[in-house]
Image (cartoon, helix red, strand yellow):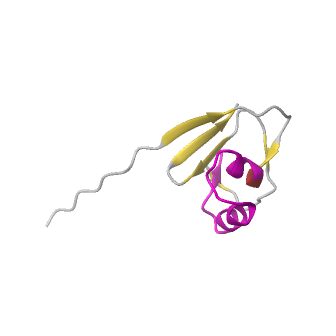
Amino acid sequence: MKIKVRLAEKTQVNKKIDTEFIRLDAFLKLVDAVQSGGHAKIVVQDGEVKVNNEICIQRGKKLRPGDSVEFNNTIYNVI
């Protein structure tokens, strides 16, 4: 029996910020990846979010232009 596995392609989304940095939880809300700040806290603490290809469990992590956030098969680029 052969099993074929298809990996879903990751979607890329660019989001411009007007400040020097933005916190990870606020960024997830800004790009509508989560429904609320509480939801952001849960997904970050559960290790479901990657920042620059590394799992990040700090919801207050400062993101700056050039950083990327991966969640739910989508890559969000901070520009």
Q: Which residue corresponds to the image point at 79% horizontal and 52% vertical from the top-left?
A: 61
Q: Is residue 21 above or below residue 26?
A: above
Horizontal side of 6 relative to 71 (left or right) equals left
Q: Work out which residue is located at the far left of the displayed protein and give it.
A: 1
Viewer-side residue, 35 vs 56: 35
Q: Which residue corresponds to the image point at 60% horizontal and 61% vertical from the top-left?
A: 48
Magenta stretch containing residue 31, yes or no? yes
Q: Is residue 28 above or below residue 58?
A: above
Q: Which residue corresponds to the image point at 36% horizontal and 51% vertical from the top-left?
A: 7
Q: Image quadrant for the C terminus?
A: top right
The image position of residue 15, as x and y in percent, is 67, 35
Q: Work out which residue is located at the far right of the displayed protein and give it.
A: 20
The image position of residue 6, as x and y in percent, is 31, 52
The image position of residue 1, as x and y in percent, is 13, 67
Q: Work out which residue is located at the far front of the displayed protein and give it.
A: 35
* Number of marks in picture: 0
Q: Quadrant of residue 39?
A: bottom right
Magenta stretch containing residue 41, yes or no? yes
Q: Quadrant of residue 76?
A: top right
Q: Which residue corresponds to the image point at 76% horizontal and 34% vertical from the top-left?
A: 17
Residues shaded magenta = 26-52
Q: Quadrant of residue 67?
A: top right
Horizontal side of 45 relative to 74 (left or right) equals right
Q: Is residue 46 above or below residue 56?
A: below
Viewer-side residue, 28 vs 63: 28
